[in-house]
Image (tube, rainbow, N blue to C red):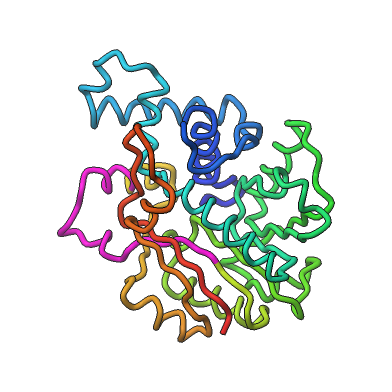
Amino acid sequence: MEEGRASRTAIATAYFRAHHDKYANPKIFEDPLAGALLHADDVAPLERFLLAGVAKHNPELAASGADRETRIGLALRGLVVVLARARFTEERLADAMRDGTAQYVIIGAGLDTFALRRSDLRGRLRVIEIDHPATQAFKRGRIRDAGLELPPNLHFAPADLEKESLAEVLPRTPYDPSRPAFFSWLGVTMYLTDEAIRATLRSLRRTAVPGSQLVFDYLDRAVFDPGSPTPARARLFEIVRRVGEPMIFGFDPSALDAELAEEGFRLLEDLGPEAQKDLYYGNRTDGLQPTAAARLARAAVA
């Protein structure tokens, strides 16, 4: 992302969550507050970009007279993983809380609304959001603009994780290193180098007690093979490239267990598109399908 500027993929993610919450039925994930953090000047350029993409890649639909929201919904389908990963994470967090976990660390939080939505958990769960200072300042401003109350259990930790580690950031927060924690790391790994990812895993391992859990999403490494492009994949890569945050990294699913073990983690789940379809895409009439090559993983500190 550009220095001093809020992440544009974080804004796009919030827009998709807001659009899905307003128009989709049934909903994969409900986020009634995502739209409250966006202004018209955030939404307008995104919608122009999405509609231009429909006109370019699906001229039949563009000329069919389909309404604006139908065309935007079609353009957003390649990013549907943002819904599945949010639901997967919050379901697994709920499981961890039943087992006694009482602190949740969101790495690269963007415009996530979990703490704002879940007032019922304010006395039971400490939420720590770590993100780039520019994105976090943007978010805090939008929370104020929306007139939303900052929950007492929400703690912001501005940090550039390219310059300092989790182990350096967390002591500045109410994080308790002697207690299990649940970490989410969503929409991040595909933008980092292999070494940056491993450094984050090592840092997390140093600061988290055994049994702590990490949920993250990733791309199948095969998606970067130039010999097997697909139109949908090309459009996805073009979207993030044009907003200045290109995707550069993917894991090999067959090697993920071993790679995590090298960094001190035990793989608990690794859900590919078919598994996600079974969990989250049943009984749909709108044709919404999991994002190809996008996977959801959960691991525990060994």
Residue pictured at 78% horizontal, 32% vertical: 147
Among all residues in the image, which is located at the extreme front? 283
In depth, the one of 208 and 240 nearer the eye is 208
Among all residues in the image, which is located at the extreme top? 65
Residue pictured at 19% horizontal, 52% vertical: 229
Among all residues in the image, which is located at the extreme left? 227
Quadrant assignment, res 172: bottom right
The magenta stretch is: 215-236
Residue pictured at 67% horizontal, 53% vertical: 133
In depth, the one of 181 and 75 nearer the eye is 181
Magenta stretch containing residue 229, yes or no?
yes
Q: Indicate the position of residue 37 as horizontal and vertical percent values.
A: 65, 35
Q: Indicate the position of residue 259 as horizontal and vertical percent values.
A: 41, 81
**Horizontal side of residue 15 vs 277, given as left or right:** right
Magenta stretch containing residue 122, yes or no?
no
Total count of labels: 0
**Horizontal side of residue 227 vs 169, given as left or right:** left
Q: Indicate the position of residue 206 as horizontal and vertical percent values.
A: 64, 83
Instruction: Pick the quarter of the image with the C terminus.
Output: bottom right
Q: Indicate the position of residue 237 as horizontal and vertical percent values.
A: 33, 48
**Horizontal side of residue 178 vs 159, given as left or right:** right
Quadrant assignment, res 205: bottom right
Residue pictured at 47% horizontal, 35% vertical: 26
Q: Looking at the picture, does residue 47 appear above or below residue 293?
A: above
